[in-house]
Amino acid sequence: MLELAGVSKRFVIRHNPSLDLKVRVLALFHPRHRERWQEVWALREVDVHLERGESLGLIGPNGSGKSTLLRIMAGILLPTRGRVAVSGTVAPMLELGVGFHPELTGRENLYLSTSLFGFGRRQTDALYDRIVAFAELRDFMDAPVKTFSSGMAMRLGFAVATHLEADILLVDEVLAVGDRAFQEKCLARMSEVRARGCSIVVVTHDLDLVRRFCDRACLVVEGRIVAEGAPDEVAARYCGGGVTAEPVHAF
Amino acid sequence: MIRDLVRYRPLIRNLVLKELTLKYRGSVLGVAWSLAHPALLLLVYTLAFRHVLRVPVPHYPFFLLVALLPWNFFATAASAATGAIVLNGSLLRKAAFPREALPIASVLFVFAQLLLALAVFLPALALARGPGLKWTAVLLLPLLLLHVLFTTGIALLLSALTTAWRDIAHFTEVGLVLVFWLTPIVYPADMVPGSWRSALALSPPAAFAAAYQDVLFWGRVPTWTTATSTLLSTVAALVLGLVVFKTMSPAFLERV
């Protein structure tokens, strides 16, 4: 179960590329060099409640705060205000494959990834075959990840995250990569872990995915949840305008 | 925090293994570099300080060795620590593991190389015609433990501070060179003018160097001053490092 109450997140954006001594001295004489910064509230008073085995879709324009929200759920970012209560373990799938080290082999990266979530070697040994089979990478695990295609790295990342047997799975726009067959396999896998009681939060621009997979959806605009409810209705609200948004699909 | 770190022991081990693998994979001499590096330093310092500057210490290469290896561990670990957080943004973004694991792993990675070097050079010290090893060599074990804890404290401190002030990395590079030459490693402490020697008593690196020279080279138990100085500086470094790290770690992701 996951509960966010009144969660706000403030970022400070600095507009000076450099604040070295030279710039600081110049600032004494010329206002152009003064430190310029701006507060951005990426999230404002957000409440989210997620039940066991429930799947929630977060949709909204770019820069609306969806990914920040996911990072706060993952415990990677701390909220500026508000309260986050999580019961159980969280497996975030953010920027799949990004944390892989290109020089290490698939196997070494797999063990490193699971240990980021506190898994020991023996625990990972027990999962190893299933993860590799799911990722369809059996013949490549001893090759350095730099030789992997981005799709292969993504498959490995997805396979690791969905086999951690976490209570909450957080998915950030990862199904966009990967071919159609693998996307279907990922969806099937996510339904499977959900059926076992895992709660899932998906951030995506793919409204079709939200309609098909999620029990509930939230529309996030400028750091606020402006609509919440059945995926169909929330997606329709998003498409129907009232939201200043960039195009949903780039092509 | 300690319980977290115990749970995440596999992570620390994997991070250390990762660094070791990356360091040696693809190089022809591999692990031998970890021995060649101190051996070459030893050679050139011996030329400079025994044959040119004529430092009056018998068995000079051995005298140099016993404090130089631990110093290299400390210096390499401290300078690696400045990048332990800022260069690992991609790992920080992946999961909410205890952030302490990164600087701790970077210290242990360098420590593994010190142990390797000691495993080769200590038998040489015992067997070669030189000062030999006395029973005081067993004191090396508590001394290494204190030194690795002291270095961990400094590493936590530097890794956290670098996220806010990137200058710390440059400052550390320069600072380590200055401290090296001000510490009685290549020369014995009794060559230092009397009025400066009291200042040396306040320097943790000087206390550690003296302790290593005592137990491995002179074959005597370190003085009370040396022993308390290493102990107190270890406690101080750990407390300071942990407090600063804990205070700053919530903002790491916004600064890397």
Image: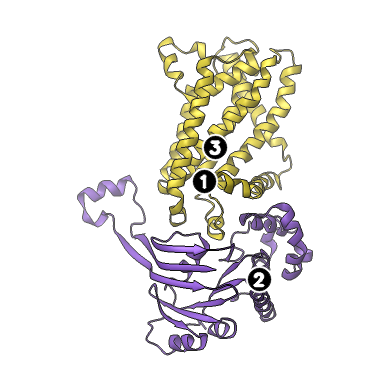
**Chain letter, purple:** A
Foreground: disc 3 or disc 1 = 3
Relative to A182, is A229 on the left or the right? left
Chain of the residue where label 3 is placed in the rendered structure: B
- In space, the residues marked 3 and 2 are separated at their CA atoms by 39 Å
Q: Is residue B75 visible?
A: no
Q: Name the residue that disc number 1 marks.
A: B83
Q: Amino acid at mark 1?
A: Gly
Chain of the residue where label 2 is placed in the rendered structure: A
Relative to B83, is B61 on the left or the right? right
Relative to A102, is B181 on the left or the right? left
State the residue in front, B185 or A54: A54
Number of numbered callouts drawn: 3
Q: Quadrant of residue A147?
A: bottom right
Q: Name the residue that disc number 3 marks.
A: B152
Q: Quadrant of residue A158?
A: bottom right
For residue B161, which numbered disc appears in the image? Answer: none
State the residue in front, A29 or A126: A126
Looking at the picture, how far across and down is residue A167, in whole percent? Answer: 61, 66
Chain of the residue where label 1 is placed in the rendered structure: B
Q: Amino acid at mark 2?
A: Gly
- Specify few, some or many for label 2: CA neighbours under 10 Å numbering under 14, 14-19, or 20 or more: some
Q: Quadrant of the N terminus of chain A?
A: bottom right
Q: Secondary structure at mark 3?
A: helix
Residue lying at 66% horizontally and 60% vertically, measured from the top left: A146
Q: How is the image coloured?
A: by chain
Compared to residue A88, the image places residue B229 above or below, namely above
Q: Amino acid at mark 3?
A: Thr
**Chain letter, yellow:** B
State the residue in front, B193 or A77: A77
- Specify few, some or many for label 1: CA neighbours under 10 Å numbering under 14, 14-19, or 20 or more: many
